[in-house]
Image (cartoon, grey):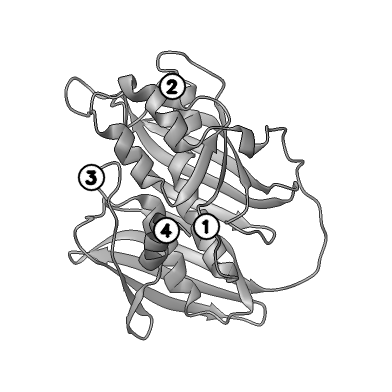
């Protein structure tokens, strides 16, 4: 296991304060706020720790309310909304400095057999043939005004082996492309056989690239380049079938719409053998800066 993955696992191992209240810390991010995927994953950990082990997460719906302070702890308070015969529902509020910064509702279900069908997996190259972040990112060093940006991007993704199928948005600045993007990802090391851990890890990664497809449609490089200002607004995930986050997963993303200073991304995550594991939808603020500051 890599040191970065070990550090991320420590981040997801929340400290219990008292019944249904947990405390988490943060790690450095590319932008000076807590990474949204971290808060979502930690909130799901908090919810999952109040649910019987035989009930797996099948969906989450979340809102990002305020930017998180990476220098302060985050307190997660869990409400036990419902414990039914098949389904369990939890609500989690993440608080910093006395204010809520994030709200999550999650549902868990005991295993059932039922009807089966799924969308076919799209074509994609073998992930082993694609460059790693450490190999790919230095190629675009001249696109960033901050000389330390490449190193910060590599550090932020060190726990996860994330490989772009095509050039990322900052690789084709000024060139409008089809609003679709694919990445393969897996953790940089093996994980324990805990289904909740794999779901939480996928939740963490799901916030990394989903709005890329919005940027591609307009030839924008993204927040690291500085030609847009953005932040996640809300996030929803449905977990359809078992998967492992330490094995290759294809994240097939697209944007059907952008308007009103917001962009929508939607995606499907497939296992390497073609099973549809997760559906993801996210809306985010995507604004063009007005002069030296964001409007």
Labels 1 & 2 near each other (Cβ < 8 A):
no
Find the distance from the CA under tag 4 to the CA under tag 2: 28 Å
The spot of residue 196 in percent (x, y) is 55, 68
Local crowd size for mark 2, using a 10 Å CA cut-off: few (<14), some (14–19), many (≥20): some
Find the distance from the CA under tag 3 to the CA under tag 1: 27 Å
Query: What residue is disc 3 on?
Result: 32
Q: Is residue 268 above or below residue 87?
A: above
- Kindly identify which numbered label has been placed on residue 171: 2
Query: What residue is disc 4 on?
Result: 40
Which residue is more in the foreground, 218 or 130?
130
- Of mark 1 and mark 2, the one earlier in the sequence is 2
Labels 2 & 3 near each other (Cβ < 8 A):
no
Foreground: disc 3 or disc 1: 1
Q: Is residue 34 above or below residue 212?
A: below
- Kindly identify which numbered label has been placed on residue 189: 1
Foreground: disc 2 or disc 3: 2
Quadrant of residue 291 in the image? top left
Labels 4 & 2 near each other (Cβ < 8 A):
no
- Of mark 4 and mark 1, the one earlier in the sequence is 4
Find the distance from the CA under tag 3 to the CA under tag 4: 17 Å
Element marked by disc 3 = loop
Foreground: disc 4 or disc 1: 1
The spot of residue 128 in percent (x, y) is 62, 38
């Amino acid at each position: 296991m890599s040191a970065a993955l070990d550090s991320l696992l420590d981040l997801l191992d929340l400290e219990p304060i008292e019944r249904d209240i947990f405390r988490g810390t943060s790690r450095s991010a590319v932008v000076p706020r807590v990474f949204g995927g971290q808060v979502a994953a930690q909130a799901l950990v908090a919810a999952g720790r109040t649910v019987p082990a035989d009930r797996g997460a099948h969906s989450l719906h979340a809102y990002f309310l305020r930017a998180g302070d990476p220098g302060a702890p985050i307190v997660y308070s869990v409400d036990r909304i419902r414990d039914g015969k098949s389904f369990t529902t939890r609500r989690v509020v993440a608080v910093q400095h006395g204010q809520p910064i994030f709200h999550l509702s999650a549902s868990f279900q005991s295993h059932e057999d039922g009807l089966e069908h799924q969308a076919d997996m799209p074509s994609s190259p073998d992930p082993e043939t694609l460059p790693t972040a450490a190999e790919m990112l230095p190629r675009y060093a001249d696109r960033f005004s901050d000389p330390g940006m490449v190193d910060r991007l590599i550090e932020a993704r060190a726990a996860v082996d994330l490989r772009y199928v095509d050039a990322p948005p900052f690789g084709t600045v000024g060139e409008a492309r089809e609003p679709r993007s694919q990445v393969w990802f897996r953790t940089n090391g093996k994980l324990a056989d805990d289904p909740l851990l794999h779901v939480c890890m996928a939740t963490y990664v799901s916030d990394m690239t989903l709005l890329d497809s919005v940027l591609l449609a307009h030839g924008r490089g993204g927040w690291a380049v500085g030609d847009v200002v953005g932040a996640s607004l809300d996030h929803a995930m449905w977990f359809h079938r078992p998967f492992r986050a330490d094995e290759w997963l294809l994240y097939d993303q697209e944007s059907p719409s952008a308007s009103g200073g917001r962009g929508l991304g939607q995606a499907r995550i497939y296992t390497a053998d073609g099973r549809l594991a997760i559906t993801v939808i996210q809306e985010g603020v995507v604004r063009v800066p007005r002069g030296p500051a964001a409007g």
